[in-house]
Amino acid sequence: MATATELRARREALAAQRASGVARVSYDGKTVDYRSVAEIDRAIEALDREIAAAEGRRIVRQVRVTTTKGL
């Protein structure tokens, strides 16, 4: 299992490449090609969960639904 520091480095690499629009990410001597920005986003979310677990905390996601019945 990777340490929190290694996971953060991977996350930073993913976020930097996502911001630049490049779908190829290199870290720890490995290169990964992603098919879409959505796939990079999912990888970042997974790393966020792994980082939280390594630090002994958990991520709480909230979804708020509001509806109206016509105007």
Image: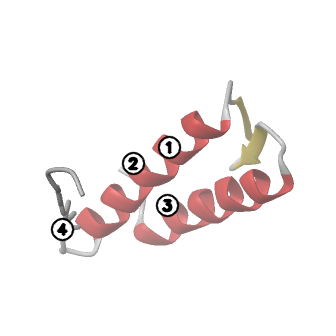
In the image, what residue occupies the spot 75% across and 61% down? Answer: 16
Query: What is the crowding at mark 1: few (fewer than 14 residues within 10 Å), some, or many (at least 20)?
Result: some
Residue position for label 3: 7
| First-in-chain label (3 vs 4) | 3
Q: What residue type is labelled 2?
A: Ala
**What residue is pinned by disc 2?**
46
Query: What residue do we see at 68% from left, 24% from top?
Result: 35
Expressed as whole percent of the image width and height from the top left, the position of residue 12 reads 65, 65
4 vs 1, front mark: 4
Q: Quadrant of the C terminus?
A: bottom left
CA gap, disc 3 and disc 1: 11 Å
The image quadrant of residue 26 is top right
Distance of label 2 from label 4 (alpha carbons): 13 Å
Q: Which residue is drawn at 47% across and 42% down?
A: 42
* Few, some or many residues within 10 Å of mark 4 (<14, 14–19, 20+): few
Label 3 is placed on what type of residue?
Leu
Q: In this view, does 14 lie to the left or right of 57?
A: right
What is the spatial separation of the Cα atoms under label 2 and label 3, in whole angstroms? 10 Å
Residue 3's disc number: none
- The residue identified by callout 1 is 43
Helix, strand or loop at label 1? It is helix
Q: Earlier in the sequence, mark 2 or mark 3?
A: 3
Q: Do the residues labelled 1 and 2 touch (CB within 8 Å)?
A: yes
Cα–Cα span, label 1 and label 2: 5 Å
Of tags 3 and 4, the one toward the viewer is 4
Q: What element carries label 4?
A: loop
Closer to the camera, 37 or 54? 37
Label 3 vs label 4: CA separation? 19 Å
Q: How crowded is mark 3: few (under 14 residues within 10 Å), some or many (20 or more)?
A: some
Residue 46 versus residue 31 in the image, above or below: below
User: Which residue is under mark 4?
Assistant: 60
